[in-house]
Image (cartoon, rainbow, N blue to C red):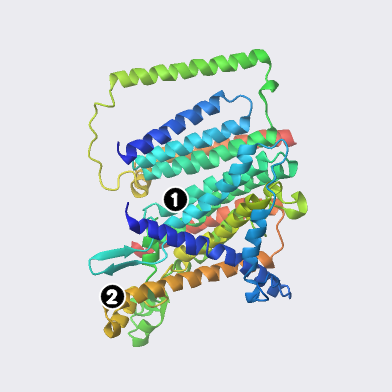
Amino acid sequence: MTTETILFYIFGGLAVVSALGMVLNTRNTVASALSLVVTMVSLGAIYLLLEAYLVAAFQIMVYGGAIVVLFLFVVMLLNLSTDEFPPGRQRLIKSAFVIAGVAILVQILIALGRDPLLAAQPGAVPEGYGGYRQVGISLYTDYVLLVEMASLLLLAAIVGALILAKRKID
Amino acid sequence: MPIEPIIKILFIFSVMVMGLAPIITWIERKQSAVMQDRIGANRADLNGITILGLLHPAADVIKLMTKEDMVPDGANRVMHMLSPLIAAVPAIMAFAVIPFGGVYVFGDTTLNLVGADINWGLLYIFVLGSIAAYGNVIAGWSSNNNWSMLGGLRASAQMISYEVTMGLTIVGVFMVFQTLRLTDMALAQDSSFRLLGFLDLYLGLDWGWIDWIRVPAWGIVYQPLGFLMFLTAVMAENKRPPFDIPEGESEIIAGYHLEYSGMRFGLFFMSEFIEIILIAALTTTIFLGGWAVPLLSTDTIINGISSVMGAGFATGLCILIHFVTFLLKVIFMIWVQMLIRWSLPRFRYDQVMSLCWKILLPLSIANIFVTGVVLLWVKG
């Protein structure tokens, strides 16, 4: 086995174990959020092994860093516990998540059966592919409309959140 | 195993981290003493020898090592033990991408004085910064103490906010140097340009002395506003006064590290000082020319010495000159940070937040816009 294979198994295993730890841990919300961080960082390490440096950096910086810190902030601030939902609603939420998870798993298996990834031959990668320069150029030339639409969507979300919060404060 | 990276890692670790960090605790005590008209650390002695109080860092370490290691009741033991490491390790790892010298050629071997020469070096530092935030947040949460919890909450809010601004304030420099690789940035600043060059380019004045008035092509010359804003943002990210909201000694006692004692507290303490060195090294590399000697490029130095002493010796001496230049600039930036820390009163929480979102963020976006317009105008 090469070093890369060994590292892949280490980080892949870590990602799976911590993802399970996040879902199955029902006692402690903060510990769940921290397992999510471990999952994100291990996914970032796997992207690094694929030499997708920009994706790895964003994976850890945006998902592992900013977003989960925000989760933690909210969890610590509100100190939520599952008891606050009525029991009937809890069962509903749980079964909804189980159904969604099974549906996604089935879809993945179907996709794998139709298009076997292992048989596919990797194509030639152009110089600098996936680097910050290429990603930046294609974001601001080919996909500029989509980028602007996404930013408008985010702006609308921010304004909406502000209005909701303001009504509560007033 | 290749031996070269191991030597580099040991060198960076022993000089930049373990060498400088204890000394700057002494610098801070002495500098604050000078600024407040006191004598400062001078009591620790070996047989009456005090060496200006330089034995104090050693005494501090011995004290912290031998103190009782307390874990409060009801604390999450594992997280309580892990969080100082989460805070300290990323700060040390970040030194891997900071060049402490250029690329030198000895016959047929080349020597690149940087731990890891990766082309997304600055992103790597931001990635580590976003992980380091967890150290403080988890410390606050796992201590089972309300003051600590408040400190952890404040740390998470402050660090996310300033991470955004820190990234945006530095975009102008990316645009000027067209790279994220820190070695390339330092190399680009190893040159100078004519301050009055526009006189003969645009006005056609053919005066000989125009060539002699030169300015080093440093980041701070291209991006003075970017430099000020970046320094503010990284100092806020380091959470030392005047931005010590998560610690807030007058409000929440010691915030997130209230329940820490012994060497675990020492690690939080050390990680702040390691971050001071990191900030100094980073601003030096990005804005102050890194290892470059102002107005004397590498070729000038090597050619100048090798005409007298021979090429191999000249390259060796050049490495030494560059490393000492880098170290002097780093120490200067450490001094500036200490000066700010001991001059300004601490901000209120809302002041820190409005500085970030209402002043630094719009200004940095304006800086990006102006830089873009100027670059388009100059490069066509």
**Label at residue B312:** 2
Residue A41: % across, % down: 47, 39
Report whether residue B243 is seen: no
Looking at the image, which is closer to me, B122 or B146? B146
Looking at the image, which is closer to me, B54 or B119? B54
Quadrant in which the C terminus of chain B appears: bottom left
Where disc 2 sits, the SS reads helix
State how far apart marks 2 and 1 are (Cα). 34 Å
Q: Which residue is outermost to the front?
A: B47
Residue A44: % across, % down: 43, 39
Residue at image position (33%, 81%) is B204
Residue B340: % across, % down: 64, 66
Where disc 1 sits, the SS reads helix
Tag 2 subunit: B
Q: Quadrant of residue B10?
A: bottom left
In the displayed structure, B19 sits above or below B140; it is below
Report whether residue B8 is seen: yes
Q: How packed is label 2: few (under 14 Cα within 10 Å), some, or many (20 or more)? A: some
Tag 1 subunit: B
Looking at the image, which is closer to me, B372 or B97? B97
Q: How packed is label 1: few (under 14 Cα within 10 Å), some, or many (20 or more)? A: many
Specify which label sits upstream in the sequence, 2 or 1. Answer: 1
Q: Which residue is outermost to the bottom?
A: B208
| Residue depth check, mark 2 versus mark 1: number of the one nearer the observer | 2
Residue picked out by circle 1: B124
Q: Quadrant of residue B249?
A: bottom right
Left of B278 or right of it: where is B308?
Answer: left
Residue B298: % across, % down: 34, 74
Amino acid at dot 2: Gly
Amino acid at dot 1: Tyr
